[in-house]
Image (tube, grey):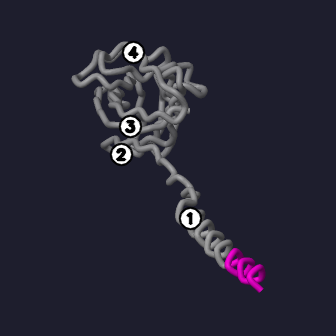
Amino acid sequence: MKKAQATVRELGLASVLLLLLVAYLYISKPNTSPEPSFKAKCVLPENISCNSLILKTNGKLDFVLAQDTGGLINVTSFVCTKYPTFPTLPALNNSVLITSGEKAYVSGGNSGNEVNCSGRDGVSIPSASAGDIYDGNLYIMYKLKNGDSKFINGTILVKYS
C-alpha cells in the first residue's frame, strides 16, 4: 500500500512541475510580433515632392522628383548632406527637365547623375549597413522656363538598402 501512495505522490509532484514548466514557457515566450515597417520620409516645399528614394550603403542616392508647379522646371543642382549649414551647390552632370505633373530621376536611374549623401562634414560618405537610417538635408536648385532660378531645401529620413 505504501508503494502505491508514493506513486500517487510522485504523480502529483510531476503534474505540478509540468504546470510550472508550461506557465514559465508561456510567460517567457519570445515576442513574435512583426517589427513595425519603416516608412521613408521626404519633406520638400512648393509643389515639389519626392516620388521615390533609395539610399544604397555606398552612399549613392536614387531619387525621383515630382513637381506640380504649373510649368516646366530644369533641375540644375542637387545635394544630399548632413552638413548643418548651407552647402556649395555643384551643378549636376546632366540637368533634368520635369514638366508639371510629371516626375523624373534627378540622381541614379536614367538621369546620368550620381549624388552621394554626405556626412556632417559635407564631404565624407558615412559608413553604413543595410537597415541603418540616414537623416539628412536636401538642397535643390532649379530654373523656371523664364530663366528665374529657385532654391528649395528639405529633409529626408531613409533606410540604407
Number of dots carrying numbers = 4
How crowded pointer 2 is (Cα within 10 Å; few <14, some 14-19, many 20+) is rated as: few
Identify the residue under disc 1.
Answer: 24
Disc 4 or 2, which lies upstream in sequence? 2
Element assignment for label 4: strand
Note whether 156 is above or below 140 in the view shown.
below
- Magenta stretch: give its range: 1-11
Disc 3 or 1, which lies upstream in sequence? 1
Q: Nearer the viewer, mark 1 or mark 4?
A: 1
At 53% from the left and 52% from the top, the residue drawn is 35
Identify the residue under disc 2.
Answer: 47
Identify the residue under disc 4.
Answer: 91
Q: Nearer the viewer, residue 36 or 27?
A: 27
* Tag 2 and tag 1, C-beta contact below 8 Å: no
| Residue kind at label 3, given as amino acid type | Ile
The quarter of the image holding the N terminus is bottom right
At 51% from the left and 40% from the top, the residue drawn is 52
